Structure formats: C-alpha cells, structure tokens
Amino acid sequence: MASEPPFVSSPLWSVQHDWKVDVEAKKGTFWVSARPLGSSSVHGNVKVKGDTLEGLEGFSATKHPNTSLSFELKHEEFPSCHVFSPTATIQTPSNIGVNSTAFSPGGELVAVAADSGYLAVYSTSTYKELRRMKGHVSAVQTCRFFPSGEVLLSGGADMRLRIWSVATGECPVTLTGHGKGITGLGMIDRGRNIVSSSRDGSIKLWDCGTATCIATLSVSSEPVHDMALLNAPALAQQEGHNPPHEHEVETQGHVVVACTSDNAVLCDVRARSTVQTAEFASPFACLSPSASMGGMGLVTGHETGHVCMWDMRQLSTPVSVYQQWEARITSISATSPYNATFMASTNEGTCFGVDLETCTSTLLTGPELDPLTQLTATEELLATSCRDGAVRFYKSNPHPVVDQL
C-alpha cells in the first residue's frame, strides 16, 4: 500500500485590500489577519506613521526598501508573509469580467480575454489598449500569442478558435469543431499545429494552414478544465505510432497534460494515446507544469483549495499536498517573479504563493472579494484576471507605473 504524501499547510493571510492608500498617505491604520487551517483567525492592525509601519496585537510589519507597494508581515506564531500591491491596473470597458490574459514572447504586450466577446492587446509599458479584436460572439475564455508575437490565438465560449493579426486586428482563420466552449490552448513549435481543450471533454490537434482538425487526442465524459502542452520526449510513448497526418509537423515527443474534475491525464500527441492518469480525492480545477523534479514537475489546483505537487514520470500519487484554505483554486503557476514554489488564485479573490521549504507566504492584494479567474506569470511580471473587470500587474521589486487606467 502506497504511503500518504507529505501534507504542508500555512496560514491564510488577509490584508485590507486598499492598504496602499494609507501607506502612500503616510498615515492611517489598516487591518490584517492570519488563519491557520482548521483554527480561528488571529486579527490585528498595522498603523502607518510616516515611512514606518507599526504592527499591533502580535503582528509586526516592515516596508520593503524604496517602495510603497510592498511590505513584510509577521506574527509571533507563524512564518512571515510578503504583501504586494499592484504596480498597474487595466480596467476593461464597462468593467467587463476578465477570463484570461497572455503575455507576448518578449513581454512587451499583454492580451486580455473577457466576457461579451472582448479581446484586446495592450502595451505593458503604458498599459494602454493598442488593438481590439472583434469576432467572438460571447465570452472569450482563453488566449495565447504565437511564438512570433505577431499573431494571437483565442478560444471562446462560442466553441470557436480564432487566429488574429496583432498588427491589424483581423481574423483570417477560424477553427470550428468543438461542441462546447474552449478552455485551453497550446502550440507546437512555431504554431503550424495547435492543440485545444474544451468543455465538451475533447482535446483536439489542428492544422492552422488548412483550418482543419487533424485528430482528437482524448475524449472524456467530463469537461476539460485546463491543459498544458509540453515538448517532453522522456514522457512520450516510444512505440506503437501510426503514420503522421499529412499536415502534422514535429509532434513527436510532445505531450498534453489536461485535467477534468475526475483526474489529470498525460497524453502523447503523436501516438494519440493516454500515457498516465493522476487521481486525487478532491476534484481537479487547474494545473501548471513545473521546472522542479528535473523539469518533470506538475502542480495541480483543486476545488477544495488543495494544491498537489506531482512527478509526471510517475503520476500514481502526489509528491506532496498543500492546503491553505478551502476556496477553489482557479489558476496556478509554478513560474512567477516571487520566491514561491507556486502562485495560486482563488474564487474568493485571493492570490497567494508559498515557498514549501520555509512556508513563507506571498500575498497579492487588490480585489475586495471578486473572484479571480486566472493568473499569468513570467519571471518578471504577474497578471491576475478578475471578475471585477480588472487586470492587475505585480512585480517582486515593485515601483508604480500607473495608478489606474
């Protein structure tokens, strides 16, 4: 019988969402709290006295150097938490709820996908809208830049994938074939072939040049919530391949990892087969590949707030399990600007990260209680998508770019 994986927990940290107002005014008081899993919350306050923060009721607070946008929060009973406020915010027209964002390969652009067919590209230097793409007839659920940075791929609740020119906003290619909304996108090499997942339970391989579906990789009776495409020959099936489709290019060695509520599956793109399946007691909600375990790591977020670390070479049981609180994990990333094993967003409006070795936490503030739908991160910048219509941007060494747009 397999042994239980190690279980790790750290407190649920909370800070008054507009604490930055007091810090920048150099006066005032804002509330803070910490709640260990299964225990009552510990409440306190932080008083702002000029450039100094004074923690009360057992808390201490220290501003990070040369910025008003972050500070370290401590309590005598718990590991510390580093708190960050946004460096910039994009607000969609009429506060349209945001579903997804994507950074261009060079990081100079960010695409924003939202309800009501809203899809636009913004500059990450000015945070101004540069181009709006019109074509989806309902919510745009997900988006992703092609490797060139000149072309954008989007997937909508209208069951369509669209390919856009970033320069003109035109859509020369529309892909149809899914029976329900699109939930995930991936590109093979330069993007001649792409992969998509859907609430219809399917994962499809497409040829962009002919706008046709080459193959259905996996079919489930449950909606696919999230997916990632990896070039990982060590995880791929080594034998039993059929001849490739005539429009299939360089799929050898590529795998898709995707999750439904029931499980996470690892599929070989070239072999059209499932290689491994991961199961857990709590329903799966989202996932992210990780550079840990020799590049074979996987992090999954769950409906009950659990976060599981896996080795994709052996998905029979998690390597470790973490839980901070019971809120649904809506998005997760093993890449971020912060010293964290992962960063996660929840349906209660929190975005947090944890270093599993030290249990030190990172908390990104901004939303009051509105659900976060996704976080997108590079090693320099992190963006959260929120139902309040805002995309908030965070850095590890924050300096304000703009206050509000």
Image (spheres, helix red, strand yellow):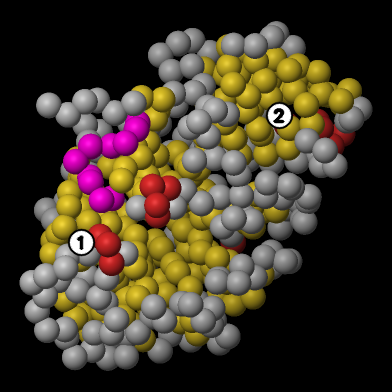
Q: For the stretch drawn in magenta, what is the main secondary structure? A: loop
For the residue carrying disc 1, how many other residues have a C-alpha within 10 Å: few (<14), some (14-19), or many (20+)?
Answer: many
Kindly identify the amino acid type of the residue bearing the numbered disc 1: Cys
Question: Which percent across, then down, holds residue 305?
Answer: 37, 32
Name the residue: 48% across, 77% down: 147
Residue 235 against residue 51 in the figure, above or below: below
Kindly identify the amino acid type of the residue bearing the numbered disc 2: Glu
Q: Secondary structure at mark 1?
A: strand
- Which of 283 and 157 lies nearest the eye of the viewer? 283
Residue 380 against residue 107 in the figure, above or below: above
**Left or right position of 46 against 289:** right
Residue under label 1, please give it. 267
Residue under label 2, please give it. 72
Magenta stretch bounds = 312-321
Residue 31 against residue 94 in the figure, above or below: above
Quarter of the rendering containing residue 179: bottom left
- Which of 64 and 46 lies nearest the eye of the viewer? 64
Labels 1 and 2 touching (C-beta < 8 A): no
Q: Secondary structure at mark 2?
A: strand
- Which of 96 and 282 lies nearest the eye of the viewer? 282
Instruction: Give the distance between the C-alpha atoms of the residues marked 1 and 2, in whole angstroms.
Output: 42 Å
Question: Which percent across, then down, holds residue 241?
Answer: 11, 75
Name the residue: 85% across, 42% down: 66
Q: Is residue 229 magenta?
A: no
Question: Which percent across, then down, holds residue 148?
Answer: 51, 81
